[in-house]
Image: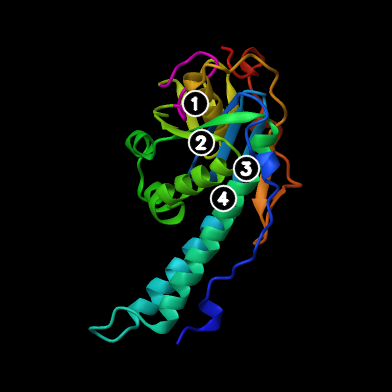
Amino acid sequence: MTNATDSEPFQPVTIDSSRLASPLADETAALDVGANNIVAATTSTGKQLLYGGRDLFDRFRETTREIARLQSKLHEGRYSSNRIRRLYRRRTKRRDHAQDALARDLMERLHAEGVSTVYVGALTDVLEASWSVRANAKTHNFWAFRRFVDRLACTAEEFGITVEVRSEAWTSRECPNCGSTDRTTRHKDTLTCECGFDGHADLTASETFLRRHSDTAVSRPMARPVRFEWDDHEWSESPRSLRPKEARTNPQVASVGGR
C-alpha cells in the first residue's frame, strides 16, 4: 500500500500554445551549469541571469548526512529502513522540484528575449578542467547533470528553443579581457586576472562560452545581472543584488561578442 505522503503531486496546467509556437527572434544564449550556482546564463541580447544553488546544496548535504547517520545505526546485514527510504525520496523530490521550476522559469525568460538556441556546457569538460570530491558530489549527485539537461531540453522544446551541448573547456578560467587562462585566479564566485579583470566567475564563463560558439552574438551593452533564489516554491529575484565586485567587468569587454 502506498503512503499518501510519498505519492507524487500532479496539477493540470493549461498552456497557451500560441506563444510557444516559435521563438520571437533568432537570439542565442549560453548556460554555465556550475557547482556553486545552478545556472549562469548570458544571452546575445545582453541579458545575464544567475540562479543560486548554495542553500539548496546545503539542505541536500544535510539530508545526506542524516541518511549516513541512520545507516550507521542499522543492524549488521541491513542496508536501509523505511525512514532512510523516505529521506531519499524527500531529498530527490526537493531537488527535482527546484530544477524543474528553474528550467521553466529560465526558458520563459529566454523565450521573451527572442532566444532560439541555447548552448549548455558538456560536463566532461568541467570535470577534466577542475575536478574535486566536492564538485563531483554536486554535479553527479545533487545537480544530476544529465537529468537537468534533459529537463532543460524538454522544456525548451515547448517554446520552440533548441538546446545544444557543446564544449565549454576552460571558459571558467579564461579572462575575457586578455584571453589568458594561466594568469587568472578563481576564488568562489570571483574571477580575477593579472591584466586587471575582476568579475563574477560563472557569469563570465557563460559570456565566454556564448562568444565561443554563437555566430549570431553581436556587440551589445550588458545589462546588470539578475540573481534568483529558491524559496521552496518558486525562483524569485533576490533582494540581495550582486555585489558591485561580482558584477563588474572590464569596460572593454562589457558586451557579448566583443573582446
**Residue 106 can be seen in this image:** yes
Q: Does residue 62 appear in this view?
A: no
Amino acid of disc 2:
Asp
Q: Position of residue 149 (x, y in %)?
A: 46, 44
Q: Residues within 10 Å of mark 4 (few under 14, many from 20)?
A: some
Which colour scheme appears in the figure? rainbow
Decide which of tag 4 and tag 1 comes sooner along the chain: 4
- Amino acid carrying mark 1 in the image: Phe
Dot 4 or dot 3: first in sequence order is 4
Residue sticking out furthest to the right: 239
Q: Which residue is mark 2?
A: 32
| Element class at badge 3 | helix
First of labels 3, 1 by sequence position: 3
Q: Residue at x 65, y 46 (%)?
A: 105
* Disc 4 from disc 2: Cα separation: 13 Å
Instruction: Check disc 1 and report the residue beneath it.
Output: 209
- Dot 1 or dot 2: first in sequence order is 2
Residue 37 to residue 61: above or below: above
Along the line of sight, the residue nearer the viewer: 108 or 184: 108
Dot 1 and dot 2 residues touching (CB under 8 Å)? yes
Instruction: Please provide the residue range marked out in magenta.
Output: 171-181
Q: Residue at x 54, y 71 (%)?
A: 8
Q: Residue at x 40, y 47 (%)?
A: 146
Q: Nearer the viewer, residue 189 or 210?
A: 210
Residue under numbered circle 3: 106
Between label 4 and label 2, give the one nearer the viewer. Answer: 2
